[in-house]
């Protein structure tokens, strides 16, 4: 059994090494070729208003379907693109995919829906940042969507330009969310330094509901902290009915997770939204 176990383990390690090596060998080429060859696509995950159950918006999540490696997780290729200085072309590519989906998104989403996009912190400091954002905004239909940029806690703390850039984004009518709140090791001071619109409670916290008794008071504190700072709260990774009722009772403003819907390609998102509208 142990022999079999170690065999399986070394096989897994082997696969992982190969995977990493494959990307390390010609990182730039693999990614840039992926962009040119249309290997990237976007899935959209709906976000729901807790009080009314209405669809409040979507989060765009980038996907890479590599021709030989198959699906590569954004948890792998995003940090990698950040390290290799490729995050800006990749994000511009993401914007261009979203732009091609706009006509369908308008059909699927109610007016005023939030269009959530994850932004890499380093992009904030890039000379092209304003141009990149302005070009995206120019392609959005009037005020149909509210753009919402999601930035992790780490990004809040590490980027010196954040304060000025957040002000600029707000002047453009763009909202800002702290993503994965509670996973960073950051001091909470950034919460009062910046004007932030949403606090996205990491799915690690949400997962612990009903499993770990220490979670309830921590979540309670997080939610009331957000309220005091006039931030709206979003729970991510909601998977069970038990989590839903907990979050309702604790007045979390928005919910997102497999319980409602997985991230969906544009066609499936449209079907989901039409069916969902019919049921509520
Ligand atoms: P995130 O922004 O926190 O995105 C939420 C992640 O949780 C997504 O994983 C989503 O598929 C997953 N998720 C949603 N609901 C559930 C649930 O109920 N249960 C579980 N177990 N998972 C759920 P994904 O798509 O693998 O993305 C991982 C991370 O990669 C994202 O975390 C985000 O930080 C980053 N990312 C994805 N797309 C982009 C992008 O276009 N740009 C940048 N800069 N980062 C991106
Ligand atoms: Mg996010
Ligand atoms: Mg998140
Ligand atoms: Mg996350």
Image (cartoon, helix red, strand yellow):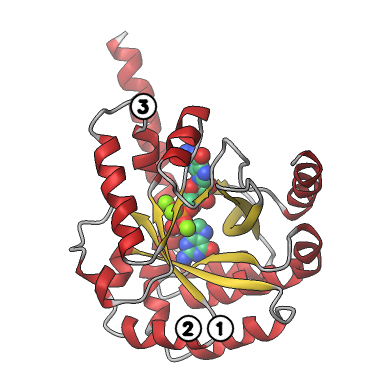
Is residue 48 or residue 34 the one in the foreground?
48
Pointers 1 and 2 in contact (C-beta within 8 Å): yes
- Category of crowding for the residue at label 2, using alpha-carbon neighbours closer than 10 angstroms: few (below 14), some (14–19), many (at least 20): some
Q: Disc 3 vs disc 1: which is toward the camera?
A: 3
Residue occupying the far top of the picture: 1
Q: Is mark 3 within 8 Å of ligand 1?
A: no
SS at mark 1 in the image:
helix
Q: Measured from the top left, where is residue 59 in percent x and y? A: 58, 58
At which x and y percent is residue 228?
Answer: 31, 62
Q: Is residue 231 above or below residue 267?
A: below
- The residue where tag 1 is placed is 133
Crowding at dot 3, Cα within 10 Å, few <14 / some 14-19 / many 20+, comes out as some
- Provide the residue designation for mark 3: 210
- Residue 11 pos. (x, y %): 39, 29
Give the class, few, some or many, for how many residues have Cα within 10 Å of label 1's Cα (few <14, many ≥20): some
Residue 193 is left or right of residue 106, and the answer is left
- Which numbered disc, 2 or 3, marks the residue that appears first in the sequence? 2
Q: Quadrant of the C terminus?
A: top right
- Indicate the quadrant where residue 162 lies: bottom left
> Residue, x 80% and y 42% (percent of image)?
275
> Of helix, strand and loop, which one carries label 3?
loop
Ranked by sequence position, the earlier of labels 3 and 1 is 1
Q: Which mark is residue 169?
A: 2
Mark 2 vs mark 3: in front: 3
- Looking at the image, which residue is at 50% across and 35% down? 244
Q: Does the image show residue 73?
A: no
Q: Residue sitting at 63 percent across and 51 percent down? A: 46
- Please tell me which residue is depicted at 20% across the width and 69% down the height of the picture: 189
């Amino acid at each position: 059994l142990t022999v079999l176990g170690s065999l399986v383990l070394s096989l897994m390690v082997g696969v992982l090494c190969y995977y990493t090596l494959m990307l390390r060998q010609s990182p730039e080429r693999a990614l840039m070729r992926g962009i040119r060859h249309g290997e990237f696509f976007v899935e959209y995950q709906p976000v729901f208003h807790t009080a009314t159950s209405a669809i409040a918006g979507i989060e765009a999540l980038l996907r890479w379907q590599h021709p030989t490696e198959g699906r590569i997780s954004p948890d792998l290729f995003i940090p990698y693109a950040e390290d290799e200085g490729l995050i800006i072309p990749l994000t511009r590519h993401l914007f261009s995919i979203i732009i091609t989906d706009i006509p369908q998104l308008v059909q699927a989403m109610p007016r005023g829906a939030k269009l959530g996009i994850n932004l890499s912190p380093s992009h904030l400091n890039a000379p092209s940042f304003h141009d990149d954002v302005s070009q995206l905004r120019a392609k959005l239909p009037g005020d149909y969507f509210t753009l919402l940029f999601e930035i992790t806690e780490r990004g809040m703390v590490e980027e010196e330009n954040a304060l000025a850039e957040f002000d600029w984004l707000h002047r453009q009518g763009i909202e800002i969310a702290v993503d994965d709140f509670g996973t960073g090791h950051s001091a909470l001071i950034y919460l009062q330094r910046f004007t932030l619109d949403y606090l996205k409670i990491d799915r690690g916290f949400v997962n612990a509901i009903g499993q770990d008794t220490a979670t309830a008071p921590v979540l309670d504190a997080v939610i009331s902290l957000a309220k005091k700072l006039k931030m709206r709260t979003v729970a991510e990774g909601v998977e069970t009915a038990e989590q839903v009722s907990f979050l309702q009772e604790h007045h979390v403003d928005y919910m997102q997770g497999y319980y409602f819907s997985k991230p969906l390609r544009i066609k499936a998102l449209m079907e989901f939204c039409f069916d969902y509208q019919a049921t509520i």
